[in-house]
Amino acid sequence: MKPSQTRKSSVFSTVAGGDSVAYRDSLVAMLLASVASIVSGITLASITGTLESLPGMLLLVPAALAVKGNIFGALGSRLGTSIHTGTFRLTARFDSVVGQNTVAAMALSLTISVVLAVLAKTIAIIFSVAPTMSLADFMVISTVGGLVASVVVLAITLLLAGGSVRYGWDLDNVVAPLVNAVGDLVSLPALVIGAQLAGIDVLTPTLAVVMAASAAVVTVWALRSSLDLVATIVRESLPVLIIAGILDLIAGITVEKRLDDLLDYPVLLILLPGFLNKAGSLGGILSSRLATKFHLGLLSPDALPRRGVGSDVAMAFSLAVPVFFVAALTAQLGGAITGDIGPGLLSLIAATMLGGLIATVCVVVVAYYSTVVAVRSGLDPDTYGIPIVASTLDFVGAFALILALVWVGVI
């Protein structure tokens, strides 16, 4: 290799955090996710009539997008760790590692969808978001949309896990962005499906009661299950997913209160899912990589990050620059496809990059310390890291984007 080539390779390796393969895999996964972001963003921008006819529905959007990443991103992270530790076997047996993880993920999807509906109505009252739709409407939209999307995201997560074994991918580098992307792609259309069942006399309240009762039964069964891994995952996940849901709903409040400003430039609604996806994906990648290193004994849970963390932090920042830039471009492209107006490409790029920088700083802090706290508490960082990071980033990301839009003068 020529000296100039060696220098270029060394520079790239440094920018990539010392792991050019991981950087490449993560960047490709996140750029692929940008395609899904266009679809989900266009979907959000196209349902403004539904958002106005069902007041409060926008509260559910960040939570609905995040809950798939929280549950199935954590599932992928656990499967990634099982691959690294040699315990992974792709089988349909319910008592296997994959089988128990699958059962736990679907049980959590139903339960958290019901909890989100109750929390959304409660938070709307607390923060004086008025008027809002009924609790039954929230329940039906959240649960029907959540279950429809969960089936699709589960299938993709298992395919990714199988592909990682067959083709040698590191699941830690690809699962968060791709699961978040698929979640974005299917969650909003799924919410629209759920919305069709809202506001119908007799049917809506009846379906809400059935969903709530089913969630209660499933939760009790899972917590008392003879399948130890199912019981452990559900018991450890419920508290953190509820906290994550509250953060996501507060993010929804942030967006809901600026809905009129966002409707002035519908391109911003196209940008929103992609922006939150990128922030959550960065956090998911960093959290997954740190969790695996803790499991393998390569890191210790110190109060201050040690040398081994620096490469992962460098990779997060080096990924942030291209992916947030692409997020702005894809939003502009989505606007061109739909004919929606925006604030102008330069203003959009400036606001997205500024908001992305703020979000990435928070990614690093939250990902490291949430993982450290989980390890020190004797909990599985795979189960705790991604939900906490993703949901914190939804809240911080929504706030950072709105703040950046104000600073740049867009809204």
Image (tube, rainbow, N blue to C red):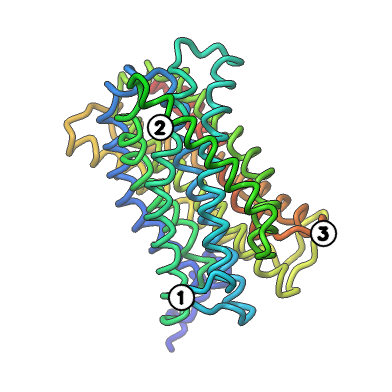
Q: CA distance from mark 1 to mark 2?
A: 34 Å
1 vs 3, front mark? 1
Quarter-of-image position of residue 207: top left
Q: Position of residue 283 (x, y in %)?
A: 57, 52
Q: How many marks?
A: 3
Residue, x 45% and y 21% (percent of image)? 256
Mark 1 lies on residue: 164
Mark positioned earlier in the residue sequence (1 or 3): 1
Residue, x 28% and y 37% (percent of image)? 43
Q: Position of residue 253 (x, y in %)?
A: 52, 23
Residue type at tag 2: Ile
Q: Is residue 379 above or below residue 350?
A: below
Residue, x 54% and y 30% (percent of image)? 249
Q: Position of residue 274 (x, y in %)?
A: 39, 43
Residue type at tag 3: Asp
Mark positioned earlier in the residue sequence (2 or 3): 2
Mark 2 lies on residue: 141
